[in-house]
Amino acid sequence: MIETDALIVGAGPAGLFQVFELGLLDVRAHVVDAMPQVGGQCAELYPDKPIYDIPALPVCGAQELVERLMAQIAPFKPTFHLGQEVVKVERMPDARLHVVTSTGTEFMARTVVIAAGVGAFLPRKLKIDGLEPLEGRQLHYKVRDPSMFAGTEVVVAGGGDSALDWALELAGKGAAVVLVHRSQDFRAAPASVRRMHELCDAMEMQFVEGDIAGLEQDDGRMTHVRVRGKDAVVRRIDAQHLLVFWGLSPKLGPVARWGLNLAKNQIVVDTEAFRTNEPGIYAVGDINTYPGKKKLILSAFHEGALAAFHIREYLNPGQKVHLQYTTTSPIMHKRLGVETDPEYKIQRDVA
């Protein structure tokens, strides 16, 4: 049984920054995440995509952001429990929360912060039998190594930002890139759609309107993607790789059974402390909802800061939590290791 003042469920940007804000207030945390690595959607879905709205960083790669957050929370030495999902939360007579994960890890937590993004997000897959052996080899629902598609024939299926982004990224790098979507209406950024049409006009890629009707294989290898157009004609497209980006199917999973107030699969919180209806349980990031909610990483950082102050007060009833600035507070410097870490001293002297 692991006893902790705070247990954070989710190791994406919201969960990582929550570690930082709690650490500044001298609240140490354990972190649980269902994925085998930290980073949440940033690391899983778009590690190489640039982010432009992080304060003071004109541009930052998604994976770079995760690495920066990990460096920022290093002074607080959080403990990560990865590759396991929270399956049970039970209120104990002393108000603490007994939390159990899918691997049998047990916590006795005084507070829990849910920072699980959209929940257990799963890609919407092709509903064709017998494709499992191709997944990860020729059939892909995410891209981990773009270099594997260089010099190959690639079909990209989808009409959203992910599909357009990767079609544009791979155009010119593959022997042939074909984008397949069921209509001329796209959910992607207008600039990406314009660029796609420009590349099609320049014959650097191709767009085919229709639905995927099947795959053809030869000796266990995919050779063609079959696409049915609006005219009901099925066309065969040469393909060594098929990238399917039909969006995610978010599922709250066990969180839905925790007795929390929900609205459209999101957890209802207040905007004072981002508390749920259950004492000691908070929710920050994409998984929560409140009037005016915006699903931005920036918003999650703000939510985590306010939640941390209330958690500190919740853990220490009757003690006022004073606001201290990291620029001048000796207490903050000590917690951050500023006075003992030569690297921090150099940075401060340069500033």
Image (cartoon, rainbow, N blue to C red):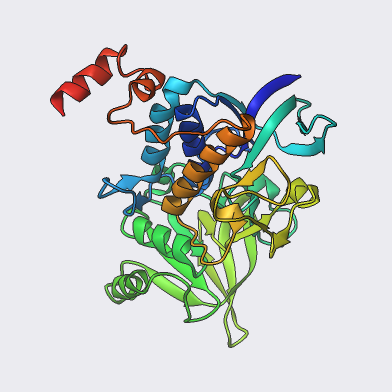
> Which residue occupies 43% across, 37% down?
66
The total number of labels drawn is: 0
Res 323 → quadrant: top left
Q: Residue furthest front?
A: 318
Q: Residue furthest right?
A: 93
x%, y% of residue 27? Answer: 54, 26
> Which residue occupies 37% across, 25% down?
332
State the residue in front, 259 or 209. Answer: 259
Q: Quadrant of the C terminus?
A: top left
Side of 31 where 190 appears, left or right = left
x%, y% of residue 294? Answer: 48, 62
x%, y% of residue 23? Answer: 48, 27
Side of 96 where 289 appears, left or right = left
Q: Quadrant of the N terminus?
A: top right
The reply to whether residue 222 is in sight is no
Side of 73 where 12 appears, left or right = right
The reply to whether residue 44 is in sight is yes
State the residue in front, 203 or 263. Answer: 263
Side of 151 where 288 appears, left or right = right
Q: Residue furthest left?
A: 350
Res 288 → quadrant: bottom right
x%, y% of residue 159? Answer: 49, 70
Residue 345 in the image: above or below residue 96? above
